[in-house]
Amino acid sequence: MWDFTSRQRGPLAPIGAITAPGQRARSAFVTHYGPVPAFRPERWKFRVFGATAFGAAHDLTLEQLHGLPTAQLTADLHCVTKRTWPDNNWGGVLVSTVLDLVPPAADVTHMMVWAEYGYSANLRLSDVTDGRAILATHHHGEPLSLEHGFPLRLVTPHLYGYKGPKWVRGIEYMVGDRRGFWEERGYHNRGEVRHEQRYSYQEAPDEGPPL
């Protein structure tokens, strides 16, 4: 079990509502762009593609994904709009487990996480390789609701919520950085909570590709 609690301190630990700069705790919220997609199990698959070590894409059914080793992660969820949903327990598959199953090529530095309706979020490979990121299937021991991303959502507690798409459908390995949906629309390319990286105008020259 992985337990990254919301009150841990240190350079790699998620930070909680008390210590997250500029955040205010809220009991619960549901935020997403666009309508809630319908779930069609006969069509659903999770694809790992792009610059894989083997040069080919790899698809997983939901049953196969559920068959991978599971983990738990406990942390606050921080929205870039300064709201924090504290003390969430997520269950699912660590992203690092998927990377072990379908390794990226040696020169991969970033990934794009793809979700329903073409939504995307770009992350550095280092954001997901230390066990901080989980592909969640459960919340507080119960399967995700449709509104919260069923059957699969990405959770990256050290980054703002727009970096963790709901209704995830795949991971694309990339040998360079490329902006995702909100990153193209003015949100910070990295989105680290600890440094309040909210908007693209805050970016240093080395923190993202040109808009």
Image: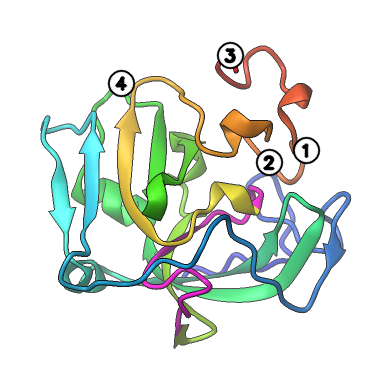
| Magenta stretch: includes residue 146 | yes
Residue 115's spot in the image, x, y percent?
Answer: 39, 52
Task: Assess whether mark 1 and mark 2 are in contact (beta carbons under 8 angstroms).
Answer: yes
Tag 4's secondary structure? loop
Tag 1's secondary structure? loop
Residue 199's spot in the image, x, y percent?
Answer: 74, 33
Question: The residue under label 3 is which amino acid type?
Answer: Pro
Report the residue marked by disc 4. Answer: 107
Cα gap from disc 4 to disc 1, whole angstroms: 27 Å
* Up-down relation of residue 103 to residue 96 (above or below): above
The answer to whether residue 189 is seen in the rendering is: no
Q: Is residue 61 left or right of residue 184?
A: left
Say which residue appears at 26% left-offset and 25% top-offset: 106
Report the residue marked by disc 3. Answer: 210
Earlier along the polypeptide chain: callout 4 or callout 2? 4
* Secondary structure mainly formed by the magenta segment: loop
Tag shown at residue 195: 1
For the residue pair 186 and 104, the one nearer the viewer reads as 186
Which segment is the magenta one?
143-160
| Magenta stretch: includes residue 57 | no
Report the residue marked by disc 2. Answer: 192
